[in-house]
Image (tube, rainbow, N blue to C red):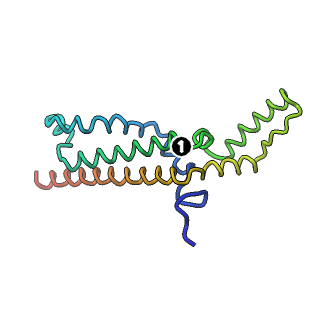
Amino acid sequence: MARPFWGINGYFNWWNLRSVGNLLVLKVSYPVLALTPFISQYRELSKFLHVYNNKITLVAFFGSLFLASANLLYDVFCPVIVKRFDSPNTTYKEMLDIKLRSIIAQPDDTFDASLEHCKRAYNRFSESSRVLGSVCAICYLLAVALFAYIFFDRVCVVIEGMIVG
């Protein structure tokens, strides 16, 4: 049986995207997205940054667009429990702390802080919003592919420069 694209047993879910979505360095895609058209208008600056090639500028723009879209989808639609806790075990630890405080303040409270409850809840949130999560994963994959193209192109330019020069 083929492995599904989205879900706990799939290639992607919010928990898988968490490691990328929580990286602050990727939030730079918003300014890059806004600056790319302006940088391409100034030939001296473009040549200094080695982005004077229209193809590279276009790929950088769309790579930033996909990265910004993926970050926006992650920031807006990824469940808070997945963003905040890195696993069901961390969630369980926090739930135990809440349970202890609850017992002191409300002795009759029947709050369920079991490990099984935390696992079920965390996994349910990890695979929620199947369509939006899949679009987010695809945007990240497209951004990686476009930036890999730029990297490969720049490596070829450097190697060509070493061979010719």
Quick check: 16 above or below 44?
A: below
Q: Position of residue 117 (x, y in %)?
A: 75, 48
Residue at 55%, 54% in the rendered image: 130
Q: Circle 1 is placed at which residue position?
A: 77
Residue at 85%, 35% in the rendered image: 109
Left or right, residue 16 beside residue 91: left
Secondary structure category for the residue under label 1: helix
Q: How many marks?
A: 1
Residue at 65%, 51% in the rendered image: 124
Residue at 27%, 49% in the rendered image: 59
Specify the amino acid type for callout 1: Phe
Quick check: 106 above or below 16?
A: above
Q: Position of residue 2 (x, y in %)?
A: 54, 70
* 37 and 164: which is toward the camera: 37
Q: Position of residue 37 (x, y in %)?
A: 24, 38
Left or right, residue 30 beside residue 94: left
